[in-house]
Image: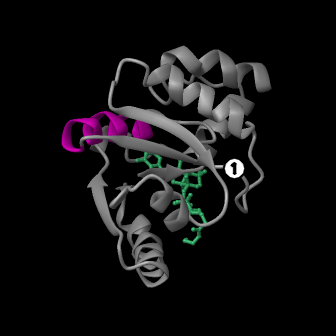
Amino acid sequence: MYPGSFDPLTNGHLDIIQRASKVFDMVIVGVLENGNKKPLFTATERLEMIKEVTKDLENVKAEAFSGLLVDFAGQHNASVILKGLRTVADFEYEFQMALLNKALNPNYETMFMMTDSKYSYISSSMVKEVARLKGSLDGLIPYSIIHKIKEKY
Ligand code: COA
């Protein structure tokens, strides 16, 4: 289970999904529907973008969820919650979330995959900022979805 807001999916996220698809039998990308953040894209739009860029990965599927992550993982019999770690700054927050999820349901293990160094500076907020200011999105998000974010601005 690879959960996140994916508002929008970046090349960093895609790199994790591609590598995870080689390690795990099945990867479910869980798109948080109604988190604390006010998303630019609806959950349906975010799902469509993920499905578009992962269409060639046979063992990857994407689904939206609301409510607790551990409950969503349970519905899919997922045993591992996968998160990407970019910098040391991510660690403290991710560590806390992993412990909280463990406390909510001890059946799940959180595993971390190091983000490829060439994507370590990318975040969805930065991508939106660059798009808003009409900068180039080449290399930041998958080429096939660049037009979707341009349309929003
Ligand atoms: N490459 C690029 N960017 C990455 C990345 C990677 N490998 N990994 C994380 N990021 C970035 C995202 O782009 C995002 O950037 P932004 O803040 O600029 O938007 C940021 O890291 C945070 O990612 P996000 O997808 O918002 O996830 P999160 O780590 O905040 O957690 C959930 C999202 C869905 C996992 C979490 O909110 C959740 O589990 N919610 C369900 C409710 C629940 O169960 N709560 C209790 C447990 S906390």
Q: Magenta stretch: residue 16 in it?
A: yes
Q: In percent of the image, x 43 and y 25: which residue is there?
A: 54
> Could you tell whether 125 is left or right of 83 in the image?
right
In this view, 46 is above or below 80:
above
Q: In percent of the image, x 35 and y 74: which residue is there?
A: 107
Most frequent secondary structure within the magenta stretch: helix
Depth check, front residue: 47 or 58: 58
* Residue 105 in picture, x, y percent from top left: 44, 78
Q: Amino acid at mark 1?
A: Glu
Depth check, front residue: 146 or 77: 77
* Residue 85 in picture, x, y percent from top left: 35, 57
> Could you tell whether 59 is left or right of 105 in the image?
left
* Residue 45 in picture, x, y percent from top left: 69, 30
* Residue 103 in picture, x, y percent from top left: 45, 84
Q: Magenta segment, which residues?
A: 12-24
In this view, 88 is above or below 114:
below
Residue assigned mark 1: 33
Q: In percent of the image, x 38 and y 33: which residue is there?
A: 60
Q: Quadrant of residue 127?
A: top right
Where is ligand 1, by quadrant? bottom right
Q: Quadrant of residue 21?
A: top left
Answer yes or no: is residue 75 visible. yes
Q: Tell me the SS state at disc 1.
A: loop
| Ligand 1 closer than 8 Å to label 1 CB | no
> Could you tell whether 126 is left or right of 54 in the image?
right
Depth check, front residue: 78 or 15: 78
Answer yes or no: is residue 153 visible. no
Dot 1 surroundings within 10 Å: few (below 14), some, or many (20 or more)? many
